[in-house]
Image (spheres, rainbow, N blue to C red):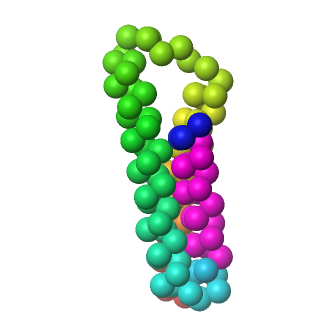
Amino acid sequence: MEIIVNAGQARSLCFEALRAAREGDFTQAHTLLAESDGFTKAAHRMQTKLIEQDAGEAKTPMTLIMVHAQDHLMTSLLARALSNEIVLLYQRV
């Protein structure tokens, strides 16, 4: 659940950053993206911990919640990358 919660918060902050950029508040947009990074790091730390516990030996059973958590993390990473690019595009315009 830690991955899901942190990745979800990271993704939400990315969308808040996009709203701020659309309104012309680029300082706030960059602040929100930076805040998003902290939640992404927390989710990634938990993912790394789970990978280390498994050590590629299938010690940890694959569950639907783990697949769901991975999906949340990957979606938030994509949202972060795209949000940064879109904020930069808004700044150019």
Count of numbered circles in the view: 0
Note whether 68 is above or below 84 in the view shown. above
Q: Is residue 38 left or right of residue 11?
A: left
Highlighted range, magenta: 4-19
Q: Is 11 contained in the magenta span?
A: yes
Which quadrant of the figure contains the N terminus? top right
Q: Is 27 contained in the magenta span?
A: no
**Residue 59 at x, y = what percent?**
43, 11
Most frequent secondary structure within the magenta stretch: helix
**Residue 23 at x, y = what percent?**
64, 86
**Residue 53 at x, y = what percent?**
37, 21
Q: Nearer the viewer, residue 90 or 55?
A: 55
Q: Residue at point 59% right, 28% down?
A: 67
Q: Residue at point 65% right, 24% down?
A: 64
**Residue 45 at x, y = what percent?**
39, 41
Say whether residue 89 is visible.
Answer: no
Q: Nearer the viewer, residue 79 or 35?
A: 35
Which quadrant of the figure contains the C terminus? bottom right
Residue 56: image quadrant is: top left
Q: Residue at point 55% right, 35% down?
A: 70
Q: Residue at point 47% right, 76% down?
A: 30
Note whether 64 is above or below 18 in the view shown. above
Q: Is residue 29 left or right of residue 55?
A: right
